[in-house]
Image (cartoon, helix red, strand yellow):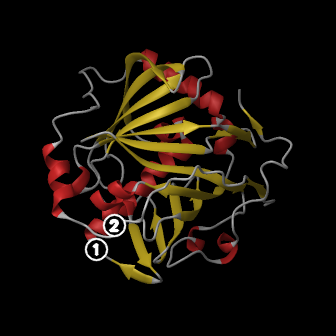
Amino acid sequence: MRRRTYESPMNLPPSGLKMPTCQTCAFYVIFAVSLSGCATVPEPHPGGSDARAIAILQQAQETQGSQALHSLHDVNVRFEGKWNSIVARLQPVLVDDHFRGTSEERYLIRDAAVGQTHVGPSGTKYVFRDKNETRVWYDGKENADAEVRDAAALVADNYRVFLLGPEFFSERSVILQYLGSEDVDGANCDNLLAQLKPGLGNSAEDRVVISIDSEHHWIRRVRITLNGLESTRGAVADVYLRDPIRIAGVLWPTNFYEELKRPFDSDVHHWRLTAIDLDRGLQRDSLEGPGFKGPATVPAGQSLRNLKDAQKSQ
């Protein structure tokens, strides 16, 4: 297959955040006692999906370019970002910021499989996840700890949500219900409730409020429950999907901002898609670990700015 490559420069604002130096029980006490406040994600009402919600999501899929996305075999990306050190202390296994700074990620679209190479100040973390298993390696050594695997599975599935947007929800058996409208990130949006069974990562169930721009029909925000990890059950996070660019017929968000909404309000993570290339013809065995193999090892992308058909959507 012909490989298509794109890249954009990193342009993160200075965070002024220090790396975490310790973990204390106090953070977990705060997490536990604060669950009574802040934003929640509602339970679905009886009766299953409604036609209005299905139609809005289908329109968002058409805007995204679902037909073009289905034609892709593999998507290869690089992300770069900054973590809030307070949240990193609160959830050290999930955030894992000593090993998660930049990442190279390879997605097999039809197989719903992903390989992720994360690099941080303490070394390299590699994750492989598909529909059947999640495996994790630190600096080439496999880690079979259940909490580590649960955290990796949760991260891998959430990044599929963020990157693939409305198309992700067509992969799952979901209940979709219309919740009403809300101003999100400066735009009027239709809010849809999606109930996922199974949920994200290794959870039995999760719920997502999908905020879809009512004029432009793309996702502006997802509000997600985090039930895939014992220590985050009951927590809710908002992730904003910004600065979409259409490449190869598909609308890709390029700027991501995550904030915790429950048990308390806090910024969590700001990251960018800095490179993307498509259709290397990757096979599953090139992703199965303990790191990338063959063509998967090549870093993602060339310059997005130099690509004539990469245009920011208005």
| Side of 254 relative to 220 (left or right) | right
**Which residue does the numbered mark 1 point to in the structure image?**
145
Quadrant of the rendering where the N terminus is positioned: bottom right
Residue at point 85%, 50% (across, down): 306
Q: Is residue 309 visible?
A: yes
Residue at point 54%, 22% (across, down): 186
Q: Are marks 2 and 1 in contact (CB under 8 Å)?
A: yes
Residue at point 77%, 57% (across, down): 5
**Which residue does the numbered mark 2 point to in the structure image?**
149
Residue sticking out furthest to the front: 16
| Side of 306 relative to 271 (left or right) | right
Residue at point 32%, 64% (across, down): 92
Residue 98 on image: x %, y %: 43, 70
Residue sticking out furthest to the bottom: 141
Measure how far apart labels 2 and 1 are at the Cα level.
Answer: 6 Å
Label 2 sits on a secondary structure element that is helix
Task: Depth check: give the residue in front, 115 or 313.
Answer: 313
Residue 175 on image: x %, y %: 35, 30
Tell me the quarter of the picture where residue 215 sits: top right
Q: Is residue 288 above or below residue 47?
A: below
Q: Amino acid at mark 1?
A: Asp
Task: Depth check: give the residue in front, 82 or 21.
Answer: 21
Query: Local crowd at mark 1 within 10 Å, few (<14), some, or many (≥20)?
Result: few
Residue 103 on image: x %, y %: 56, 64
Q: Is residue 191 above or below residue 136?
A: above
Label 1 sits on a secondary structure element that is loop
Residue 86 on image: x %, y %: 33, 55
Q: Is residue 267 above or below residue 147?
A: above
Quadrant of the rendering where the C terminus is positioned: top right
